[in-house]
Image: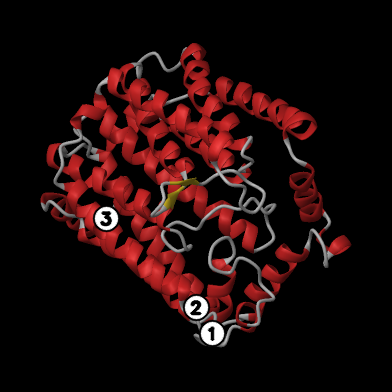
């Protein structure tokens, strides 16, 4: 890191609120709002998302001034985990099936998706587990035990079925295991387990429509009017944006409704069509700035718990980012996963800003950590 960037980073950590991180997240929300507002004459998604944005900002500031140290206590995390499992189980009994999945719990005046909370809670649980056993991480027993927490959530979410959410849970676990200092031998073992799990999922876990999504990804031209339609239209939208885009409000794929789910799963394709390659580069830069600030805050955590929480949060956002954009560009199968801070939806927006607010709260007890000390600690050198 250059002296100038390091100096700026240190100055930012001395203030209570990391305005660069908050501004980056807010700009991403604005990108989504502008894109939603250009879809159709009726601005239902745009107006609702503005309300959720306001609520999310309020929650962010409230969370940043709250003391979250109680989340370091094992009994608290286990109680929350047990409650969450009960809520996820309740979905199979009371949740309505929306777009083929029982993922939403209705409380009358609003609905929310417990999967969003599950991902953040898993970060806390793994941060607590690995922070207490950091020196012993080379023992594969701890990898297996930590994997059981993730596996329980993975199964419950996959059975909804919400394959995108389940994949995000796996990415959080795998990413936090990696930053905790796992050996190369154990990486090979984990990779083998992943391949075996995928084989089992294909034969016993995936629904027929999920299998057809994967098949259509491998051979998208075989059924353009059927299972390959969404991915094909998304690729057309991204490509048609060319260098400078068609202009805000002139994206024909989304405006004429050729592009499905243009406010959630495929909002990046709608954005790329209107903003073009230049806009996408700016978008990537803003998201990269957000991740940089999250990691910078994490690296200066007061304890391993805060460090691992921040890194886990970065892994969560990056996994959503990579999977969603990979889907939009035809590089990954369609999984139905939101683009952080950009896709429509109050549940994931509130949860994301809450998670950032908690990270802000931890800034009060952050200390400067030397770069080499951090590198040695996490890479096991």
Give how far across and how far down residue 347 sits, in percent.
Answer: 42, 52
Q: In this view, does 16 lie above or below 266?
A: above
**What residue does disc 3 label?**
2
* Residue pointed to by mark 1: 244
Say which of 115 and 3 sits in front: 115
Mark 2 element type: helix
The image shows residue 349, relative to residue 268, as above or below, that is above
Q: Position of residue 56 (x, y in %)?
A: 30, 57
Which dot, 1 or 3, sits closer to the camera? 1
Of residues 101 and 273, the one nearer the viewer is 101
CA distance for labels 3 and 2: 27 Å
Question: What numbered label is drawn on residue 278?
Answer: 2
- Circles 2 and 1: CB atoms closer than 8 Å: yes
- Helix, strand or loop at label 1? It is loop
Which quarter of the rendering shows the C terminus? top left
**Residue 31 in view in this figure:** no
Report how far apart the C-alphas of labels 2 and 1 lie in the structure: 6 Å
| Residue neighbourhood size for the residue with mark 2, other residues' Cα within 10 Å, grouped as few (<14), some (14–19), many (≥20) | some
Compared to 265, does 103 lie above or below? above
Q: Which residue corresponds to the image point at 19% horizontal and 40% vertical from the top-left?
A: 362
| Horizontal and vertical percent position of residue 275 | 51, 80
Please tell me how crowded label 3 is: few (under 14), some (14-19), or many (20+) other residues with Cα within 10 Å.
few
């Amino acid at each position: 890191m250059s002296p100038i960037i390091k100096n700026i980073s240190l100055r930012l950590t001395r203030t209570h609120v990391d305005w660069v991180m908050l501004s980056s997240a807010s700009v991403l929300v604005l990108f989504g709002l502008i894109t939603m507002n250009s879809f159709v004459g009726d601005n239902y998604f745009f107006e609702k998302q503005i309300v959720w944005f306001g609520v999310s900002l309020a929650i962010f500031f409230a969370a940043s001034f709250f003391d979250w140290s109680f989340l370091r206590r094992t009994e608290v995390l286990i109680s929350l985990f047990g409650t969450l499992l009960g809520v996820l189980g309740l979905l199979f009994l009371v949740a309505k099936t929306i777009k083929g999945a029982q993922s939403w719990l209705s409380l009358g005046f609003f609905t929310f998706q417990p999967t969003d909370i599950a991902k953040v809670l898993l970060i806390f649980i793994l941060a607590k587990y690995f922070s207490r056993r950091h020196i012993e991480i080379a023992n594969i027993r701890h990898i297996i035990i930590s994997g059981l927490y993730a596996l329980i959530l993975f199964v419950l979410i996959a059975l909804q079925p919400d394959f995108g959410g389940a994949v995000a849970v796996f990415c959080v676990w795998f990413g936090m295991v990696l930053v905790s200092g796992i050996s190369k031998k154990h990486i090979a073992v984990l990779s083998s387990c992943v391949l075996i799990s995928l084989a089992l999922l294909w034969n016993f876990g995936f629904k027929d429509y999920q299998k057809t999504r994967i098949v259509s990804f491998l051979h998208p031209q075989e059924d353009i009017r059927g299972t390959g339609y969404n991915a094909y239209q998304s690729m057309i939208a991204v490509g048609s944006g060319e260098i400078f885009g068609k202009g805000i409000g002139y994206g024909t794929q989304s405006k004429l409704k050729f592009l499905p789910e243009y406010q959630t799963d495929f909002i990046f394709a709608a954005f790329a069509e209107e903003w073009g390659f230049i806009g996408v580069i700016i978008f990537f830069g803003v998201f990269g700035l957000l991740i940089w600030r999250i990691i910078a805050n994490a690296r200066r955590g007061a304890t391993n718990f805060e460090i691992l929480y921040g890194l886990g949060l970065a892994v969560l956002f990056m996994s959503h980012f990579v999977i969603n954009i990979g889907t939009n560009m035809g590089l990954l199968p369609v999984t139905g996963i939101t683009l952080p801070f950009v896709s429509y939806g109050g549940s994931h927006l509130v949860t994301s800003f809450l998670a950032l607010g908690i990270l802000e709260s931890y800034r009060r007890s952050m200390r400067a950590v030397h770069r080499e000390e951090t590198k040695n600690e996490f890479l096991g050198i």
